[in-house]
Amino acid sequence: MRELKSRISLLPLHAIVMCVTAILSLISLFIPMFELFVQYKRQRIYSLFTLILNPRVSVPLRESNVDLDFQMFGAWMFTLTIIVSVAALTLALGFQLYSDNPGKKRLGCLSVMVLFILRLVLHIYTLSNFITSDMLTVNHMTVQRLYVVQTLAGNILSVLLMIGIFASLYGALGLKMNMKLLAYPYILWIAVFTILPLMLILFRAFFAKTAGGYTFTTDGFRTLFANKNVTTSFYGMQVTLQEYFSVFVRSLDYAVWTTIGCLFISYPLAYIMAERTKRLHKTSSKLLLLLVLPMWMNTMLRTYAWRAFFGETGVFNTLMSSWGLIDHPVMFLQNPILSDIITKLVMVNDFLPFMILPIYSVLVKIDSSLSQAAEDLGANRFQTFFKVIFPLSLPGVISGIQMVFMPSMTFYMIPDIISEGSKTTIGNTVQSFILNESTTYQQAGNVLSLILLIFVLITMGILRNQDKEASGSGGMVL
């Protein structure tokens, strides 16, 4: 017993993961993993074990009964699954606890990996073949009215099996896993929530869902680039452009002016706060808190507050009327030019902290002795700023531009609320495409998202090159 405890304590992390996964895989046979729905109502929850104990289901309906029998299917799935699970547990414990040969341990990891893959395939097969076409035909049902879904426990089992597969592959390759790998959970986060959605967008841009599966098609591109022109107003001028190109131009216009406005306001504020921090030898956390504080309020509430401020009976019109500046309320939100200006003003206000924080974090770290050295060499304050301070702060400026330009390009809530839906941007165009019932329009939405992604990647590449050049120029100044 003491020897067994010492062997367990010496197990590498990937072996522990394998053994735990194998144990849970066996236990999962007795945990409810499948939910049966008849006429959109959940009737029963099954585990593979209860599928044998209680295989028959009879659901009375208004016109007929739904009679199902899972005895044969449940017996086969339970038998195969328990064989695979017991084999995986035996090999995982046997090779890792009672074998000292590295080659045999690697072979054991490879065998366990194959069994884990087979266990996952059996789980997916059970879920997809629970309801057969014969059952649907006999009971006069459709797949929308009679179906089985996976419970939360089933989702967790799928994830655990995938983790077990990776752990056993790690051991089969003879690599050594240590606890440092647990410090990088963001790799999994990026893979699941960034790379996978982007791959799905790329896939759905070229493949449309049909009755027989997915078919390669370019209908989304044809819909998006159809020869359909619209006349729209830009800065008071009537311009005729391709329909969705005009949407792209308007979104780009909002993003550019938002970025410029944030930069012109943020840099002086960040510079003043940084100089104050250096002079007083204490942080400007309270000032930064005042700038970030509005972000704690919901964006929609802030936007509606701005809309109320510039409304027909809003604060601005009321003040101007009380001061005798106007006789009748000014319709700010109905005027295309004024509405555009207000939209950009509100967007600048919304994204301002994203520009201030990176610039301030760079400026506050610039050594004051550099400015003193430049002045000793004969440079005035103007020259010191533009030849020393500003080049060294460019990494913060570029980071701020990235944090403002990219989101404001696709942000549609503020333009939609301020213009009362009269101004269309890329964001709500993609939304309307994706929510459309037509598969062609859904594909067009994915195509537009893909084009926007390519544009963002190109922009980030350009800014990254500029960041490298700025870092290099900073080194030359020093």
Image: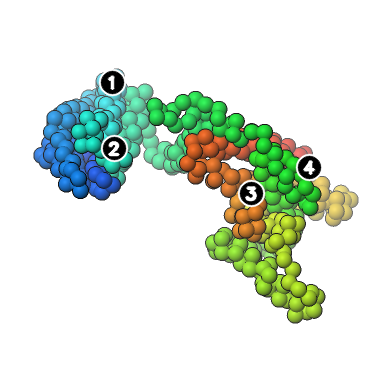
Percent position of residue 138, x then y = 20, 33
Q: As drawn, is 308 to the left or to the right of 8?
A: right
- Spot the residue most to the left: 53
The CA span between labels 3 and 4 is 46 Å
Give the alpha-carbon distance from disc 2 to disc 3, as whole Å. 40 Å
The answer for how far apart the CA atoms under marks 4 and 2 are is: 73 Å
What residue did someone put label 2 on? Answer: 142
Instruction: Please state the horizontal and vertical placement of residue 187, each as a whole percent of the image.
Output: 46, 38
CA separation, marks 3 and 1? Answer: 60 Å
Question: What residue does disc 3 label?
Answer: 424
Sequence-first tag of 3 and 1? 1
Q: Which residue is mark 1?
A: 107
Q: Position of residue 245 (x, y in %)?
A: 68, 39
Q: As drawn, is 251 to the left or to the right of 12?
A: right
Q: Which mark is residue 477?
A: 4
Q: Secondary structure at mark 1?
A: helix
